[in-house]
Amino acid sequence: MAHLRESTDKALKLLRTLPRVQIGNLRPNPNSKQNDKRGRAQHGGDKHGAGNKGSGQRQNFMRLGYETGNQPFYLRFPYEPYYKGHHMRREYPPISMLQLQVLIDTNRIDISQPIDIATLCNSGLMTLKPAELQYGFQLTDEGLDNFKAKINIEVQHASEAVIAAVERNGGVIRTAYYDPRSLHILSNPKKWFEKGVPIPLRMLPPQDAVEYYTDAKNRGYLANPEEISKERLVLAQKYGYELPRIEDDPNYEMLTAAKDPRQLFHGLEPGWLINLVDKTIVKLKTT
Amino acid sequence: MNKITCAFISVLQHSNKSYGSATLLGRQLSYKSDLSLDKIYPNARLKLYTPPPPPGSGDKFNGYIPMDKLEISYSRSSGPGGQHVNTSNTKVDVRFKLSEAHWIPEKTREKLLKALANKLNKEGYYFIKSDLTRSQQMNLADALEKLRTLIRAQELDEPTAPSEETVEKLRRRQEKAARERLQQKRSRSQTKQDRQA
């Protein structure tokens, strides 16, 4: 281990420069010697460490936190539960359907490939800050009446009306969870690949999110695909459109391309090391 | 690795696919982890498909409305809203000929014809309008919801006569009430008599 070698070298270097070990240079290990002072005679006795007069010597101490009359610090601030659990609340910055349509129309996003967080962040117009508890994007329903694009999109939250708007145009929408480390990687993939770290596994959602992502109604990535197919028909009937036959679409393969629950990037497996300079992929040897 | 596999791999490398799966000799080559969907749902159809509409089960309306049988038109909504309400067609008008609506079971259709006889237009069309929300899509959903509620209202069972137990219970209640009322009346009368000279 490099760490052990370095510390041994340092110790030997020290030994060369320090003076010879003598009784005067030594010190016992901390907390190995107990104080032998008894409560008698000049130094240990007399006041017994209680000082002179006052509540201290009379053993009538003020209670802990008392500030001799003024409102103590621990009583100054009432309980305000505004921020209770704020460090665990997930945020999903919104993208409206209108914004998405504009991005598609101005060729900022390529719809011939599946769209996910990485695509949206690489367009340069969306930023994700995982450090500020932003757990991905949500698709909002502003402009859904005029949405006309056939896309395969993966977001972190979408309402029913939005799902209907995407599916009525022949597209596919999924909601997937990414843990904070994966989000950090996806928000700037190029910068992360330059680090030279193998792609990690994506973690499963926390308990309060599992129900959402295993529900076919929300098109969750952990939901039963057969139920999702059925829910597509249900939604088509609810919102009053003819469900387009996705099997007859020439882009069927692209539209149904979905990542594995443990996968971060399409086409790349966890454990692979991407070398951007030499344009190679280093894979784990399976023994 | 045999020559066929090598050929397939070279074809794959030259293809422009960067997503999801690829097939080699008929097998899926996508990454499958310990938590892939085929392990969580082993017996499910993993590929997305369009299920056929549910079959009509005789008398009951199953909720399925074929969209091509309805005539849907959009127009501008009324009410306040400024430029948005003036320029966007958010009002939805859903029309269909009631006598030819074979997606409604026969019995229910006949009941509907009777109930809505005064509401059909000259050609026999029934229409539902909705301008509930700001969105065309949501208004269409609202119109269809109204239609389904209308059809289902005709299928509700007629109110049955109360059971023998209920009738007996009510009779006893009424008798007890009458008894108490007369008792109070008699007691009041006695009090009044006692006050007389």
Image: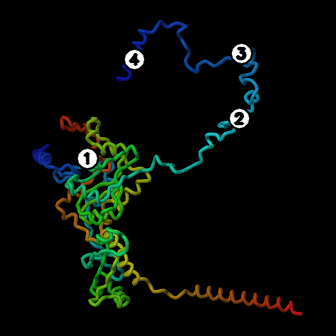
Mark 3 vs 2: CB contact within 8 A = no
The N terminus of chain A, quarter of image: top left
- Nearer to us of marks 3 and 2 is 2
Give the CA distance from mark 3 to mark 4.
45 Å
Q: Amino acid at mark 4?
A: Thr
Local crowd at mark 1 within 10 Å, few (<14), some, or many (≥20)?
some
Give the CA distance from mark 2 to mark 1.
62 Å
Q: Which residue is mark 1?
A: A122
For marks 3 and 1, the one nearer the N-term is 3
Q: Amino acid at mark 2?
A: Met
Q: Which residue is mark 4?
A: A8
- Nearer to us of marks 3 and 1 is 1
Q: Which residue is mark 2?
A: A62
Indicate the quadrant where residue B124 lies: bottom left
Outermost front residue: B82
Outermost right residue: B197
Horizontal side of residue B131 vs A79, given as left or right: left
Can residue A39 be seen here?
yes
The C terminus of chain A, quarter of image: top left
| Residue A148 at x, y percent in the picture | 24, 63
Q: Amino acid at mark 1?
A: Asn
- Nearer to us of marks 2 and 4 is 2
Q: Is residue A9 above or below residue B117?
A: above
Q: Which residue is mark 3?
A: A43
Indicate the quadrant where residue A233 lies: bottom left
Give the CA distance from mark 3 to mark 2.
27 Å
